[in-house]
Every structure is written in structure tokens, then in C-alpha cells.
Amino acid sequence: VNHPPLRPSANEPLPLGPPINSLPSMNIVIASNRRSEGPSYHHH
């Protein structure tokens, strides 16, 4: 859990469009969330 503040935001349905393009950092977070869905998340 490197980004505690992003935790709640990740739970909310974020529109995959302008916000992602506007915030390159969010793109990385989204990718991280995708991986977090797997068992690796618990290991991390």
C-alpha cells in the first residue's frame, strides 16, 4: 500500500477517459490496481 489516499478512489468507478489522459500518474495507479486484483496484491 504505497498510496493510501488512492485506496478509496480506486474503489470508486473512475471514468477511463479524460482523467486518465490528464493524469499520467493515475494511469500507473490503474495498472497497479489491475495487478492488485491478483494474489500478488496480498503479497505486496
Image (spheres, rainbow, N blue to C red):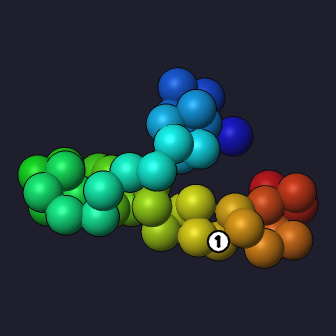
Q: Which residue is mark 1?
A: 35
Assess disc 1: are there few (<14), some (14-19) or many (≥20) residues with their C-alpha within 10 Å of its C-alpha. few
Q: Quadrant of residue 44?
A: bottom right
Q: Is residue 2 visible?
A: no
Q: From where the camera sits, is residue 23 visible? A: yes
Report the residue that reaches farthest toward the top: 5
Q: Give x and y (percent) for residue 1.
A: 69, 40
Residue 24 in picture, x, y percent from top left: 21, 56
Residue 11 percent across, percent down from the top left: 59, 44
> Along the horizontal axis of the image, is 11 left or right of 21?
right
- Tag 1: residue type? Arg
- Closest to the observer, 35 or 10: 10
Residue 16 position (above or below residue 7)? below
Apparent side of residue 18 relative to residue 9 in the rendered image (left or right) = left
Residue drawn at the location 88% of the way across and 60% of the way down: 43
Seen at 29% across and 64% down, the residue is 16
Residue 11 as seen in the image, left or right of residue 15: right
Task: Tell me what residue is drawn at x 30 percent, y 56 percent.
Answer: 15
Element carrying mark 1: helix
